[in-house]
Amino acid sequence: MLSELIKTIKEDSDFKRNITHWETIQAREGQYTNFPEDIDPLIKKVYSDRGISRLYSHQRQCYDHVAEGKNTVVVTPTASGKTLCYNLPVLNDLLKTPEARALYLFPTKALSQDQQAELNEVIKPAGLPLKTVTYDGDTPASIRVAARDGGRIIITNPDMLHTGIMPNHPKWIKFLSNVKYIVIDEIHIYRGVFGSHVCNVIRRLKRICNFYGSNPQFICCSATIGNPKELAENILETSVELVDNNGAPSGEKHFVLYNPPLVDPVQGIRRGVVLESQKLALKFLKRGIKTIVFCRSRIRTELISSYINKRLSNIFTDNSRIRVEAYRGGYLPSERREIERGMRDGSIQGIVSTNALELGIDIGGLDASIMAGFPGSISSSWQQAGRAGRRSTSSLSVLIASAAPVDQYVIDNPDYFFGKNPESALIDPNNIYIMLDHLKCAVFELPFGIDEVFGRGSKELLVYLEEEGVLRLTGDKYYWSDRSYPAESISLRSATSENVVIIDETKGKNNVIGEMDRPSAKEMIFDHAVYIHRGEQYNVRKLDIDNKKCYVSQSNLNYYTDAVVKTDIKVLEEDRRMPLSGAELAEGDVLVRKQVAKFKKIKYMSHENVGFGEIFLPEEEMHTRSAVFIFADGTASAAAFNKIPDELKEHVIGRIGSLIKNVSPIFLLCDGHDLGVAERLRDPHFNQPCIYIYDNYPGGTGLSEGIAAKSDEILHAAYARICGCGCEYGCPSCIGPDEEAPVTHNKKQQIISFFNEWLNQ
């Protein structure tokens, strides 16, 4: 069916005129090998019954590395059988060694549940004596005791390991003293501040295991990234063997870059990605093509699925026997499991999702994927495209460009998209703020010897904590002396743990239908907002932020709502200011405020703005740290900036800020979203043009201090980045595309001249 669709759309003039590039990746044969001789016959039989009578070459290579006692990281594409890479050696060894245990770490609860189901399909048919338990926040208390005492394989996430397992390690003596394997899946997720936290969690885990006499071996899996071996070795702080020679077969893949048609050629306005995505998805679904649509926001996810279902609506044909569901954060766990089951058993033919399904949750065989807008990175694009054709069949992926400049650049420059290497993942486990938090947890868990090492600079931090009264030194060991429970106040993801519960009160009901984090709630379920949940429309009667509840009732309005959010930054305290790198650089505390002041009413289907409404909610505030580049009078940066034409200054300073923010993670060993940027043409505090680079986490994580320490390297890297980029007017690899070029001034050249004069004076 897919081959017929591909032939049809290639001949469809309406579709063809919007294609900017069609990339065909040829099918490849698999590279196979036999099961190892020492595999237990029961395991071999259960896999044979599932149609797996031999291994892919990378699965065998991973097994051999593990059998030799080596830590291993496997990096192969989506649907290449990475799960078997760790399940096979772990299950086989646990059968041979009755006292051995294994710990599986996944970044989300959904992945944990998926792995539990996968293991059950192997363990139960064969009657293997390997009790497997998922241990997370949803696990009932009665099961937790049995898991600790009898679980051979414990499946959890880093957050539960951090707050629930390690602080209570005496209850886990039997498990931790016998843990032989630790599996870390989706390791590419652990980057930036989150990855730095997780590395310190692993430090603590290894320390506790060592205390109980175990020395676990690590098996890691990752999606395609630029530096998988480096990332794994940084997180584990030990050497690992890299397995990246994919032996799995793959069907022919078609990747299409698609630019929606112009609806107003004079103003250059194109048809929106929401309408274009639902149009293409309908075309695919009606031809029997199982399809997934990826969206960049929750509202787009609900809109596209709603539009598709309305177009399919027909009581006489039961909607053409096509079922389409939305999938996003905020759904109840039971709803997500139901949708996942529906995709696997074939009762759901189409799904519209945020990047929540970008990870390796098993959702069955899909034929096509549609990306409603560029996902933001090359690696995410290939992850989303890889969700189609998971069973070695042919697949079709379509990237539909939005009107955003980055999308338009990607769509017009296929060599950039298909030729660029996936992004690298960076962490800094020795970040003083993060390490200090986990050092507290480590001492709480076990007394700390004065000669013990916990990352670079840990001895100085122990002395500091003793001076603060948190620790006491008795003999040659530090002991916890505070009443607090340190792990409880430390979030690995630095996100608020406060969720707003959404309650449906239609006709006297009192049903919880979803949940949402507090900052998002202010932007999406304010009073009089339209909330869409699995195709049903609700009107928000009252958002009670103080009590973390939102009351809604079903409605049938002809519009949806979108909040208008304003961001502001204010200096709270200036710690120091100094001449640095041809400018002045200030460090201090700042207050980043987001205010949801009003909302737009947008008509369904046409997306016309049909009115505004007021929102009366308190600001969402974040007290954090920032470094500020000030183009102060008398400095080289000010002299260079003054030569830029006045009409371009505001635009250019914004591009300079983005460029500095984009290169900084390389030197600060963090991820791009760990930093925020704000540019001011005339800042009210400094009374000069300036650029704020701030920690995008409450309280700060030390990144802004790193800006000051590495400012010269960062600025010269920014200069080298823009000078070395082969584009003419700007692109995502440097300052971002200049959507107005070549009609106006060449802003890229203006910025090059600015840096040249600033840094070379």
Image (tube, rainbow, N blue to C red):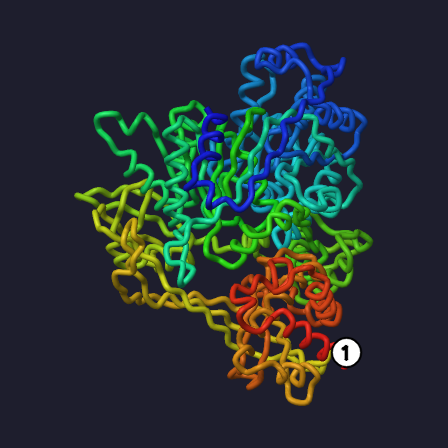
Residue 359 in sight from this viewpoint? no
Q: Residue 317 appears in which quarter of the rendering?
A: top left
Q: Is residue 307 left or right of residue 352?
A: left
Q: Position of residue 47 (x, y in %)?
A: 61, 15
Q: How many marks?
A: 1
| Local secondary structure at mark 1 | helix
In the foreground, 744 or 356 = 744
- The reply, left or right, for residue 202 in relation to residue 546 is right
Residue depicted at x 69% and y 63%:
465
Q: Looking at the picture, how far across and down is residue 471, in whole percent?
A: 68, 59
Q: Is residue 152 above or below residue 166?
A: above
**Residue on which the image places disc 1:** 760
Q: 179 or 508, which is in the foreground?
A: 508
Left or right of residue 571: residue 310: left
Above or below: residue 329 compared with residue 463: above
Query: Which percent across, then down, holds residue 604?
Result: 28, 50
Residue in the image at 72% along x and 16% along y: 35
Question: Which kind of residue does numbered mark 1 sit on?
Answer: Asn
Residue at 38% x, 34% y: name it.
283
Q: Position of residue 566 (x, y in %)?
A: 42, 68
